Amino acid sequence: MRTAIYWLSRIWRSDALSAFGLASLLLLIFLGIFGPLLPLGDPTQIAAGPRLGPPTPQHPFGTDELGRSFLPRVVQGIRATFLLSAIAVLISAMIGTFLGMAAGYFGRAVDIMVARGADILFAFPALLVGLLVAAVLGPGQVSAIAVIAIATLPLLIRVVRSVTLSVAGRGFVTAAEVAGASAGRILLLHILPNVMGAVMVQLTYALSIGMIIESALSFLGLGVQPPDASLGSLLRQGSAYLTIAPWMAMSSGAVLSLAIMSVNLVGDAVRDALEPLKGRDLT
Amino acid sequence: MSPLAEIRDLVISYRTGSGGLRALDGTDLILTPGETVAVVGESGSGKSTLGMAIGRLLPGEAHCEGGTLSVAGTDVLNADADTLRALRRDKLGFVFQNPMSALDPTMRVGKQVARAMGGKPGQKEIEALLTRAELSEPGRVLRAFPHELSGGMAQRVVIAMAIARQPALLIADEPTASLDASIREKIMATLNRLRDETGATLVVLSHDLRLIARHSDRVAVMYGGRVVEDGAVETVLDAPAHPYTAALLSAAAGSEKPGERLDPIPGMPPSLSGRCEACAFAPRCTFAREQCRTERPEPRVIAKRRVICHFAEDALAAPGAERRA
Amino acid sequence: MSTMPVINLKDINVTFRRRLIGGDAVHAVRGVSLSIGPGETLGLVGESGSGKTTLGRVCLGLLRPTSGTMRFDGQDFGRLRQRRGQLSVVLQHPEWALNPRLRCGVSVAEPLKILGAPAAARREAVARMLDQVGLTPDFAERYPGQLSGGQRQRVAIARALITEPRFILFDEAVSALDVSVQAQVLNLIVDLQEKLGFAALFISHDMAATRYVCHRIAVMLKGEVVESAPAETFYGTPEHPYSRALMEAVA
């Protein structure tokens, strides 16, 4: 907890852009978690206002074709988009870290299998995988999570594998091997803590990619199903009325862009904080 | 002869998270044309900062707090960007410790050397330059990528690039530290031969007093961001006047007889946050007295060398101080 | 018993293949035979690429030789896990010698933990070892990032010695250290060996440091040992021209 606060304060102080990214990310997460408790209105209440009504003080993002207030719908969407991508990316991080460390440390046949597998996964476009998974599991939240996890897995495997390769060649790993340490001990005690930094950086990128994929799937109707909403499904809903009620597409689209941008800005700040002056040799 | 470079009372600090770190604490060094000067010191002594400062190649955290630095008539510390670029291009050549990080891994050697030479040199000229740096198969080398070269060959390529524009001052920072013992001597010999050919001044920064001194005319020993002893190699090595020079010589393996023990220097080099108002070496010095801990020693000339020590006469007279080398 | 060599290599060859199947074979070590007795330090000098490090890995059991026999304490080497606590290593880069995420005390105690020693015994042994390498007990609580290169190398030596191993490999253990610190670490190695009597292989390209700590020196060139002689010889004139070339860098 103390380290988390330390990192947050470090990003906050690093530069204006990172601070902006952190602030908007925290605001979005706050909205996602506490949105239902805030006095924003009921996202499912039909005819809360006029149909396709423009923004008013009562309905700041306007209303949709059923007269539902759009602001609570967007807040609901933030929650779904963040939650689905976060769950998927965490699953992908756990599997990816395990496979990447195994490939990097054991090498040979394990490495070839994992690395080639990652290449094959990487070669499939995420949307194609999405169509396949949706065809098998049916459209919905579970298949959205599966697609995001599959699409971000190769990113994590590759990074963890290459960091593991360099960590495994360091003196303390050799010393532990000579002392007779088991492979499990070396992986957990010596390699895992030293690849976590790289995993954290990659996680933020994977999260933004996950949000894009989730939105794309929901936009195509393969992700979150009505009456639930995600930013992607709201964008799809809004695109249908783009000419007569542009505030729907614009508000959900703007929030989605802000979310992805703030995740990326925070990711950059984390990377800069973890690897200052990388490649500089002044000794 | 008028000096090529004059460094007087130079003070350079790095801004760090917890206050400043003073790397140079009043460094004096004068370089005359055509000589080889060995700047010797442990890590943290400020020798690399000094080397980089000559070309104003310091990172953004470094800033100058005082002193003057002029190279070939240019006031380096106050020069504008164009003057500085012209100085680096025409007057200075740098050779760093790790040749592999000095070369671009994605570009063939020939192209990199051609860029260092400027203009559009033909294959013949590039090969001639590589031959001057004693690369045996220049035709093959210039078609190779850096990773295809051995460490020694890569360092020779870096040297060729450094001398491409006939610099007046060649600065080599630990040029042999990443190389095998058997190649070190040859690289140093090459550097000295090129110095003779071009009449340039060669400054070699190193922590290995013995190796470097063999190939130098003059040695400047750095400690705590100052040049504590500066004189002709034979003068300094035969009878060091600064206790630190003496300690460095007896700590290095190489001159001991079988069964003899090495004398390590106790303690750690200082890291200064401001001007040192005492002798920086006093905490580790066997000669240290009260005066050393309270008064900053100023440079003086004793027995044909410049030294910064209150009790240099005593160090010179101490038994075992002579003929250590 | 005491005259039995700890490490005994007979006609060791190591061949690498560039690729998994096919490809050129690289002969890293050719027909090397050597033995190291208890309390003896053998120096192995030669330039990089001469096969020193490969031979070191063979001695540690990290690499199976392509052909030849290796005996440890007169017996077949067996598996590395069976030799727990009998071997250890000190490597070149001080900045990578210790796991940056572990307190130094945990790193030093690790070989004992692998042997299954109880926590109290480990704590006591860590304090004793830190004292032996000239560090205060509070170093156990520090992280490697707070230590200088020489201090880290001392901690690494404490870790290497904590199980009182029969054999220690020093692979360029002092090369990255400053001259003044080098002398401290070299003296430490000499003193500890006199006290504890382990066999040691000291790999280095630095002839001066090697002859200071070693009893015998073997010179490697292109995978072969071209000269092997008592260290005193290397204060005079060694026989092989390559050894003489190495010596010139010292004299």
Image (cartoon, coloured by chain):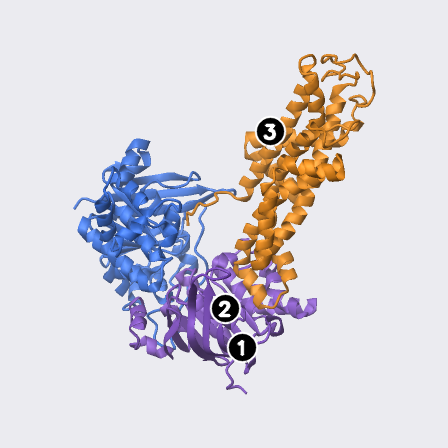
In the figure, the shade used to draw chain C is purple
- Chain letter of the residue carrying label 1: C
Judge the density around disc 3: few (<14), some (14-19), many (≥20) Cα neighbours within 10 Å: some
Nearest to the observer: residue C95 or residue A43: A43
Which secondary structure, mark 2?
helix
Q: Which residue is mark 2?
A: C57
Ranked by sequence position, the earlier of labels 2 and 1 is 2
Residue B289, quarter of picture: bottom left
Task: Please name the amino acid that badge 1 sits on.
Answer: Leu
> Which chain shows up in blue?
B
Mark 3 lies on residue = A20
Q: Is residue C142 above or below residue C238?
A: above
Q: Colour of chain A?
A: orange
Q: Is residue A98 left or right of residue C184?
A: right
Circle 2: is it few (<14), some (14-19), or many (20+) Cα within 10 Å? some
Labels 3 and 2 positioned on one and the same chain: no
Residue depicted at 31% across the width and 76% down the height: C238
Identify which amino acid the numbered label 3 is placed on. Answer: Phe
Specify the quadrant of the image occupied by residue A260: top right
Q: Nearer the viewer, mark 3 or mark 2?
A: 2
Foreground of the two, B281 or B166: B166
Query: Which image quadrant: the N terminus of chain C?
Result: bottom right
Up/down of A158 relative to B262, above or below: above
- Graded by Cα atoms within 10 Å as few (under 14), some (14 to 19) or many (20 or more), the crowding at tag 1 reads some
Which of these two is toward me, A141 or B70? A141
- For the residues carrying marks 1 and 3, which lies nearer the camera in this image? 3
Instruction: State whether residue C55 appears in this view.
Output: yes
- Do badges 1 and 3 share one subunit? no
Q: Which numbered marker is on residue C196? A: 1
